[in-house]
Image: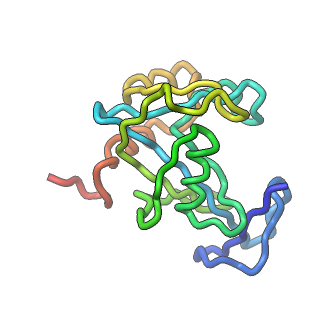
Amino acid sequence: MELWDIYDIQRNKKDRTMVRGEGFKDGDYHLVIHVCIFNSKGEMLIQQRQPFKEGWPNLWDITVGGSAIQGESSQSAAERELFEELGIKLNLQGIRPKFTVNFDRGFDDVYLIDKDVCLKELSIPNDEVQSAKWATKEEILSMLDNNEFIPYYTSFINMLFDMRKQYGSIKNK
């Protein structure tokens, strides 16, 4: 059983939790994270979901993502998901997400990290991930067109690549 901390619309933690899969009460939100790792060639590390995963089986996805569990900060949830899904140990304490995407029932903190990771050192396959590889933006967009990738907006994928080396929405010179 996975417990989630509950937040209000201002992202203040409430003094209660909910069980994953239960319905949300009005005014309740939860925290989700996504981490995208980019190598020195500008490619993103992507993962292929297991065929038995609920929701988008066999499809490719950005590096990692998942819900924060009770007591986790955004950073500690990102660290846990990286380790659980790919075996990557990374210290994100003191690192802010590049941006947050608000959705109907929560907040999705997105981290964009530059790190050369050796694919042979990843801990896959496992319960969530069957494969991983490096991909260019063009390859990911092609996979989107071919229904091989989770159906993110094309503009979202472009933004991940465009914003990986900066904070804010104004282009650095």
68 to the left or right of 3: left
Residue 150: image location, x then y, percent: 59, 33
The residue positioned farthest toward the front in the image shown: 121
- Quarter where residue 134 is shown: top left
The residue positioned farthest toward the top in the image shown: 146
Residue located at (58% from left, 45% from top)? 83
Residue 7: image location, x then y, percent: 67, 73
Residue located at (45% from left, 21% from top)? 142
Q: Quadrant of the N terminus?
A: bottom right
Query: Considering depth in this image, is 110 or 113 the residue closer to the camera?
Result: 113
Residue 74: image location, x then y, percent: 56, 63
94 to the left or right of 13: left
Colour pattern of the rendering:
rainbow
Above or below: residue 161 compared with residue 139: below
Residue 163: image location, x then y, percent: 33, 49
83 to the left or right of 46: right
- Quarter where residue 116 is shown: top left
Residue located at (62% from left, 26% from top)? 59
